[in-house]
């Protein structure tokens, strides 16, 4: 494998980095109390990737088994215990554990413990996941057609 083709063609570097202090409030708090930090969005990375920190309260649960057709999803556990499903088995993942799910890979996750948990979610290439995070809690109030369109728009295919 080789490096990709250059995308910066200037003779000098440029000042273009974006710093986000650790104490920055979450960008979205779900009705269940999960706090999501939009660290690097599709918009800010030009579609290269999306990186999110997800802080889950005790017993927050999570999505059931699903897959994505266009994006990979990776999980890096920062703190606590997150239950991860890799398509074959469930694992209690702890600080420092990592799971990469390529496009089409079955997966699920959740915090079923009595303690808070925190993880990084990486989507590659980038996808506009912000709307998904912000509206997934409203799908129960959608019509069947609206719900199907929402999940299709967000590349989420349920297996059960």
Image: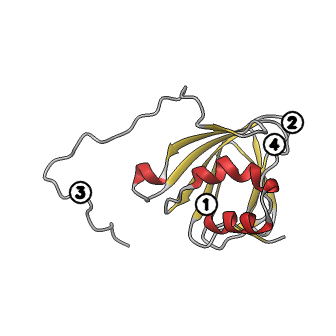
Do residues under tags 4 and 1 come within 8 Å of each other at their CB atoms? no
Q: Position of residue 81 (x, y in %)?
A: 77, 43
Q: Residue at x 61, y 52 (%)?
A: 131
Q: Which residue position holds label 2? A: 114
Crowding at dot 4, Cα within 10 Å, few <14 / some 14-19 / many 20+, comes out as: some
- Helix or strand or loop: what does disc 3 sit on? loop
- Helix or strand or loop: what does disc 1 sit on? strand
Q: Quadrant of residue 106?
A: bottom right
How much space separates mark 4 and mark 1, taking CA atoms? 20 Å
Is residue 71 among the parts visible in the rendering? Answer: yes
How much space separates mark 2 and mark 3, taking CA atoms? 47 Å
Q: Residue at x 81, y 34 (%)?
A: 115
Residue situated in front as seen by the camera: 75 or 98:
75
Q: Which residue position holds label 4? A: 60
Q: Quadrant of residue 104?
A: bottom right
Residue situated in front as seen by the camera: 74 or 45:
45
Quarter of the C terminus within the rendering: bottom right
Q: Position of residue 138 (x, y in %)?
A: 76, 51
How much space separates mark 1 and mark 2, taking CA atoms? 25 Å
- Helix or strand or loop: what does disc 4 sit on? loop
Tell me which numbered mark, 2 or 4, is placed earlier along the sequence: 4
How much space separates mark 2 and mark 4, taking CA atoms? 9 Å
How much space separates mark 3 and mark 4, taking CA atoms? 42 Å
Tell me which numbered mark, 4 or 1, is placed earlier along the sequence: 4
Q: Which residue position holds label 3? A: 8
- Helix or strand or loop: what does disc 2 sit on? loop
Q: Which residue position holds label 1? A: 73
Q: Is residue 137 above or below residue 86?
A: above
Quarter of the N terminus within the rendering: bottom left
Crowding at dot 3, Cα within 10 Å, few <14 / some 14-19 / many 20+, comes out as: few
Q: Residue at x 81, y 64 (%)?
A: 89
């Amino acid at each position: 494998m080789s490096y990709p083709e250059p995308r910066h063609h200037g003779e000098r570097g440029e000042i273009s980095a974006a710093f986000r202090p650790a104490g920055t409030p979450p960008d979205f708090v779900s009705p269940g109390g999960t706090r999501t930090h939009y660290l690097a969005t599709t918009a800010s990375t030009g579609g290269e990737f999306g990186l999110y920190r997800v802080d889950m309260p005790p017993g927050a649960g999570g999505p059931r088994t699903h897959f994505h057709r266009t994006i990979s999803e990776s999980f890096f556990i920062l703190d606590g215990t997150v239950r991860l499903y890799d398509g074959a088995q469930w694992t209690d993942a702890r600080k420092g554990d990592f799971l990469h799910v390529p496009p089409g890979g079955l997966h699920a996750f959740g915090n079923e413990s009595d303690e808070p948990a925190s993880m990084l979610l990486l989507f590659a290439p980038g996808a506009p996941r912000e709307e998904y995070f912000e509206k997934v809690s409203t799908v129960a109030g959608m019509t069947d057609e609206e719900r199907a369109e929402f999940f299709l728009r967000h590349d989420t295919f349920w297996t059960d």
